Image (tube, rainbow, N blue to C red):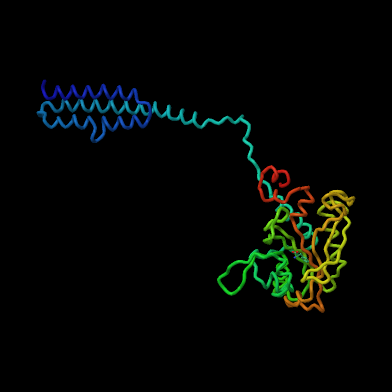
Amino acid sequence: MSESASLIASLDELRQQALAACAEAKDLRMLESLRTSFLGKKGRLTSILKGVGRLSAEERPLVGKHVNELKTVLAQAFSEAESRLQVVAEAARIAAERLDVSLPGRKLASGAQHPLQKGLNEISDIFSRMGFTIAEGPEIEDEFHNFDALNIPPEHPARAMHDTFFLRSEDEQTSLLRTHTSPVQIRAMMKHLECNGESPLAVVAPGRVYRCDHDVTHSPMFHQVEVFKVGEDVSMAHLKGVLQYFLSTYFNRDLPIRLRPSYFPFTEPSAEVDMGCVLCDGKGCRVCKGSGWLEVLGSGMIHPNVLKAVGMDPARWSGFAFGLGVERLVMLKYGIPDLRLFFENDVRFLRRIGG
Ligand code: PHE
């Protein structure tokens, strides 16, 4: 066979194979790799064309014509296959993206507030509607704010009763986890004086407190709300009126309250506050131990030494203060039988009470 005849035979073979492969290509990627292997720079056509150099001048035009024809035919075959496969690709994409808009929606589980957060908010809201400003203080406190300024000097026996978590700190200062929200009284009064000078103020301060005496009915971390008001003629009658209004509003009913003499270093006089038992309406039950009364908070008139410690003149200013335990009030309001439920994070409990 002459050189040119064998070249032409190779070209024809290439043509048949390329056309067959084109017709069978399943997708655009496959088609592209076929194009490269037949017609690419290092493809089969290029290697066949290397033989053209060996042809005589007469043979070349004949083979050249064949090559051009082949290129035209294959270009067309590839472009037709490409169009066909584009349609296939588009159909596959549409099928994959198909959405059944008639399907019912998937329900998103909605979160809920923790019952204690809900309680804190409900309690703070009642006071803020009465005109009290919401304040917060740090949970890591120093002895000055947690004790000294509250008329609890270093040797005072009340310090021992507070079951304080002390923290190791780098400097001389002793840090501790606040044992009550009363230090916010000190911080809020000092800040108020700095910004406004001596003038009346009314504050509600919700937050976490810590004590290391825990058992089944006490958690080492719990929540209090501190409430206090300072003015020129604030009396115990104001204290009783605010307590009466607050407890009746929180429990959504008329509740009797009573004040019993008590002792706190930072109030004088001090009173323990009882309210009529909300579980038996004062008739006497297991929870109120048959007395019809529940002890709910500690209160009193702010001690002159506390006013002095922040720089307010006790001859001119007086105030009341009280601190309540949030867990206890929330348990009574929602009939929660066990303190530990608050900290176990069982969603069934959180859903029932929270929200
Ligand atoms: N700080 C007191 C406690 O934690 C409660 C209290 C606050 C009592 C304000 C009187 C006045 O027990």
Quadrant in the picture for the N terminus: top left
In the depicted view, which residue is nearer to us: 305 or 32?
A: 305
Which quadrant of the frame does ligand 1 lie within?
A: bottom right
In the rendered image of this protein, does residue 298 appear above or below residue 313? above
Residue 225 on image: x %, y %: 74, 61
Residue 324 on image: x %, y %: 77, 60
In the rendered image of this protein, does residue 76 appear above or below residue 159? above
Report which quarter residue 183 is drawn in.
bottom right
Residue at horizontal 88%, vertical 67%? 237
In the depicted view, which residue is nearer to us: 230 or 200?
A: 230
Q: Report if residue 210 is visible in the image.
A: no
Residue at horizontal 64%, vertical 37%? 107
Q: How many marks?
A: 0
Residue 249 on image: x %, y %: 83, 54
Q: Report if residue 114 is visible in the image.
A: yes
In the rendered image of this protein, does residue 20 appear above or below residue 206? above
Residue 247 on image: x %, y %: 83, 56
Left or right of 331? Residue 1 is left
Left or right of 38? Residue 152 is right
Residue at horizontal 36%, vertical 29%? 82
Q: In the orientation shown, which residue stands out farthest toward the top?
A: 1
In the depicted view, which residue is nearer to us: 137 or 199?
A: 137
